[in-house]
Amino acid sequence: GAGVSQSPSNKVTEKGKDVELRCDPISGHTALYWYRQSLGQGLEFLIYFQGNSAPDKSGLPSDRFSAERTGGSVSTLTIQRTQQEDSAVYLCASSLAGQGYEQYFGPGTRLTVT
Amino acid sequence: AQKITQTQPGMFVQEKEAVTLDCTYDTSDPSYGLFWYKQPSSGEMIFLIYQGSYDQQNATEGRYSLNFQKARKSANLVISASQLGDSAMYFCAMREGYGGFKTIFGAGTRLFVKA
C-alpha cells in the first residue's frame, strides 16, 4: 500500500514568512509524529498525535510552531514568522497504536529559510 | 527524562565482517521499547529491529541482532556479514511507557563498509 507522503518535498521561504508542511500517514495508522533533522544531526522530536489529539507538545521549539491533525489522518505543521534556524528537514512518521510498533517515515520536507 | 546516547560518530568495518553499534539509554519507566533505524544517503528512514523492555530474548531480524543488556541500559546493534549497502547512518531510539508514543532518537552513528 501507499507509504507516508509529505508535501512539499522542498520549500524555500524568506525569513518572516509562514509555512505549512503537510503529512499524509499510512491509512489506519492512528499515531503520527513530527521530527526535525538538521544537517548531519539526529532527529529532534517535535510532537505526536494519537488520533486527532496531541498529548505531548513539549518538543515544539517555540510558540511559532503549531500542528494539527484532522479526521485522524492528514496533519499540518505550521511555522509562523520563519527564522533561519528553522532550516532543516522535517520528517513525518506514522505507526499503529502501541509501544512495539515501528514508525514508517515519509521522505521529508527540506525547508530553507533565506 | 528519556535519554539516548550513541557515542560512536563514525565506524568503519570491512565487508563481510560483523560490527557492533553502541547505544545506551536512560529511563525511569519500567516499560519501554527500543528501536534501531537506518538512514541511507537518500534520506529515507528504515526500521531495522525492535526490543521491548520485558522481552526475555534478544531480538533478531536477518543479519541484525540487538544485544540487550537491561541492567547496563544498553541496546547495541550487531550487523553480521556487513555489505556495502549497509553504509548509512544508524539511529537508536526509545519509546517510553506502555501506550506512550513520544520517541527519542540518539545522535546516530555513521557506518562505512569498506570493500
Image: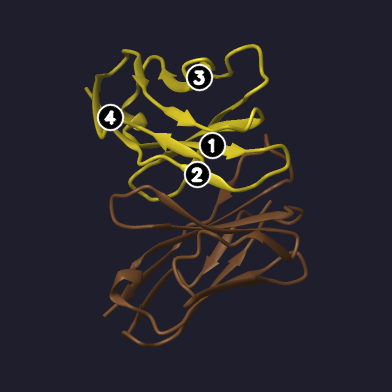
Please name the amino acid that badge 1 sits on. Answer: Met
- Dot label at residue B8: 4
Asked whether the residues under the numbered discs 4 and 2 touch, taking CB atoms below 8 Å apart as contact, a structural biologist would say: no
Label 1 in the same subunit as label 3: yes
Q: Is mark 4 on a helix, strand or loop?
A: loop
Q: Does residue A64 sit above or below B50 in this rendering? A: below
The x, y position of residue B67, in whole percent, is: 48, 15
Q: Residue B94 bears which disc, if any?
A: 1
Q: Where is residue A6 in the image (x, y as percent from the top left)?
A: 54, 65
Secondary structure, mark 1, is: strand
Which color has been applied to chain A in this rendered view?
A: brown
Identify the residue at horizontal 74%, vertical 54% (top origin).
A30
The colour one sees for chain B in the rendered image is: yellow
Report the mark closest to the observer, 1 or 3: 1
Q: Residue at x 77, y 54 (%)?
A: A28
Q: Earlier in the sequence, mark 2 or mark 3?
A: 3
Residue at mark 3: B66
Q: Could you tell me how far apart the alpha carbons at marks 4 and 1 are, in whole angstroms?
A: 18 Å
